[in-house]
Amino acid sequence: MYQSYLQFVFQSPNMQKAFNNPYTYSDWDSKSDCCDWYGVKCDEKTHQIYSLSAANGDLSGPIPPQVGDFPYLQEIDFHNQPNITGPIPFVISKLKNLRFLMITNTGLTGPVPDFLGQMKNLDFISLAFNSLTGTIPRSIGLLPKLGVLRLDHNKLTGPIPDTFGEFKGTDFYLYLSHNQLSGKIPASLGRKDFGYINLSRNRLEGDASFLFGSGKTLQELDLYRNLLEFDLSKVKFPKSLTFMDNGFYSDGNDSPRVPNV
């Protein structure tokens, strides 16, 4: 019965309209097992759908509300979908088992929804290369399993939440570049041992020396094109650091600094 319901959902006009590539989705036929359909993955034992993916222009219009009708869904991967429009729908909050959320390079607008901070199983969030606006919810920093957060290449404003120093995952990826974020980088980020940080091309100001440290495992750090200024001569670099942005210079007094750029 559940399989029949899923097939009904996939065959609904909203889903058919959204997944608008007749060639790619020619196997989305109610007479066949939906677990065999393109972009759909099911658990081998339970036959419940756990993954829904679509790439390279197959979607158009708003994300259909039927996406919220798959209670066992763990992965959503909609990337390179420039014709997706509208905000991130609230129905996604129904997906309590969701672990992986990727909606990138689309026409998404509106805010980063606060309800994402209540989805405790999320370990990967990428909403990069969209047109999202507003501030970043503090609640996202409290997700207990999150290991990757990409909100880069949007139109986000306001400060970096101080809760971002509370991330639990090791070797954490934090990409917030190419936005309009402002204010000081929260000192709480210095307590977290990040693996990769990209805060470049924002309007951040003040000190960022606390992101460094000889005992940390930081591998890449990009702070380029902000309003930061601090004394690099007092910084202890992690031995693991393999990349650092090229926005550093010497002021002629053997005191390297981050310039105001």
Image (tube, rainbow, N blue to C red):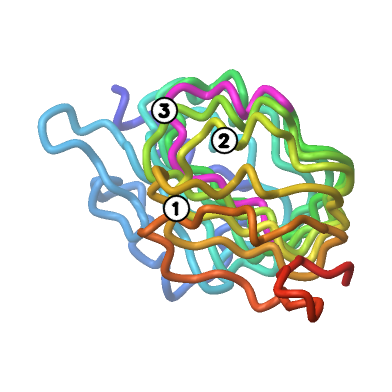
Question: Between marks 2 and 1, how big is the CA–CA gap?
Answer: 41 Å
Q: Quadrant of the C terminus?
A: bottom right
**Magenta residue check for 145:** yes
Magenta extent: 138-152
| Three-letter code, disc 1 | Leu
The structure residue drawn at horizontal position 33% and vertical position 31%, both measured from the top left corner, is: 4
Q: Residue tagged by mark 3?
A: 145
Q: Residues within 10 Å of mark 1 (few under 14, many from 20)?
A: many
Label ID, residue 66: 2
Kindly give the residue lying farthest to the front in the view shown.
253
Q: Residue tagged by mark 1?
A: 218
Residue 151 versus residue 158: which sits nearer the camera?
A: 158
Kindly give the residue lying farthest to the left in the view shown.
45
The structure residue drawn at horizontal position 60% and vertical position 30%, both measured from the top left corner, is: 165
| Three-letter code, disc 3 | Lys
Q: Earlier in the sequence, mark 2 or mark 1?
A: 2
Q: Are marks 2 and 1 in contact (CB under 8 Å)?
A: no
Q: Position of residue 72 (x, y in %)?
A: 36, 26
Q: Are marks 3 and 2 in contact (CB under 8 Å)?
A: no
| Three-letter code, disc 2 | Gln
Q: Circle 2 — which element?
A: helix
Question: Between marks 3 and 2, how big is the CA–CA gap?
Answer: 26 Å
Residue 259 versus residue 91: which sits nearer the camera?
A: 259
Q: Circle 1 — which element?
A: loop
Q: Circle 3 — which element?
A: loop
Apparent side of residue 109 relative to residue 75 in the rendered image (left or right) = right
- Front label number (3 vs 2): 3
